[in-house]
């Protein structure tokens, strides 16, 4: 019977406590692999946290913009109701249209826009401006257009504590019809 005896691949002085130096190097490499994997996992988790924070910020901005659009629409609706009774008179085009456009600049509207508890916006303000309607309306119509620009500004809550943050704003334009006298 032939018995093959394999010579010891590692010299006796390379062994320490029954574990050879090559096996210790392999065990050290596995530890480094585990630490690198942990580092990559941690970087991924930090990236997801940053992405989540950005998503919350964008959602807050979207909520503010939708509330501002609703406020501007309410203001325009109130102006249109008042405009049904406003008239243009005289060749110079004197009008009560300016009164209509100034409706949303009243203190009651300013208080409503800035009251977050009542559907307003934090640090909210509203400003309505108009261009004078033309006294001559083409086609003999009995109505004259009054162009109104409504701007709502506010400071988003997520940026209110930040230094140097700029307020957000939404501007909408509408045309109101005033009766010719």
Image (tube, rainbow, N blue to C red):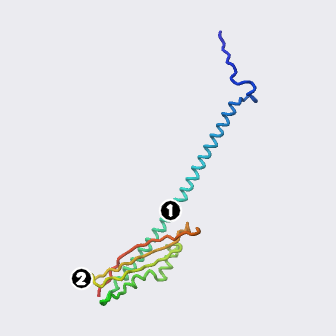
The residue at the point 33 percent across, 82 percent down is 133
- Count the numbered circles shown: 2
Q: Secondary structure at mark 2?
A: helix
Left or right relative to 66: residue 5: right
Farthest top residue?
1
Instruction: State which quadrant residue 8 falls in.
Output: top right
Comparing 125 with 73, the one in front is 125
Residue 105 position, x and y percent, is: 45, 81
The residue at the point 56 percent across, 56 percent down is 50
Residue 85 position, x and y percent, is: 34, 85
Q: Secondary structure at mark 1?
A: helix
Q: CA distance from mark 2 to mark 1?
A: 49 Å
Which residue position holds label 1?
58
Figure quadrant of the C terminus: bottom left
Disc number placed over residue 140 in the picture, else none:
2
Residue 29 position, x and y percent, is: 65, 37
Number of other residues with Cα within 10 Å of mark 2, as a class: few under 14, some 14 to 19, many 20 or more: few
């Amino acid at each position: 019977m032939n018995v093959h005896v394999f010579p010891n691949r590692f010299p006796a002085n390379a062994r320490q406590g029954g574990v050879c130096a090559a096996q210790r190097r392999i065990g050290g490499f596995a530890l480094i692999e585990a630490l690198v994997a942990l580092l990559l996992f941690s970087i991924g988790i930090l990236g997801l946290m940053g992405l989540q924070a950005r998503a919350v910020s964008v959602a807050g901005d979207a909520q503010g913009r939708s509330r501002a659009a609703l406020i501007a629409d309410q203001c325009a609706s109130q102006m249109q109701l008042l405009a049904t009774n406003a008239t243009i008179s005289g060749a110079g085009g004197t009008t009560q249209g300016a009164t209509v456009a100034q409706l949303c600049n009243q203190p009651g509207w300013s208080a409503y826009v800035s009251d977050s508890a009542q559907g307003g916006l934090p640090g909210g303000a509203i400003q309505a401006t108009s261009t004078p309607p033309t006294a001559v309306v083409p086609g003999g119509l009995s109505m004259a257009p009054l162009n109104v620009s409504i701007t709502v500004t506010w400071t988003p809550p997520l940026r209110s504590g930040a230094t140097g943050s700029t307020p957000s704003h939404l501007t909408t334009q509408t045309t109101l019809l005033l009766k010719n006298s």
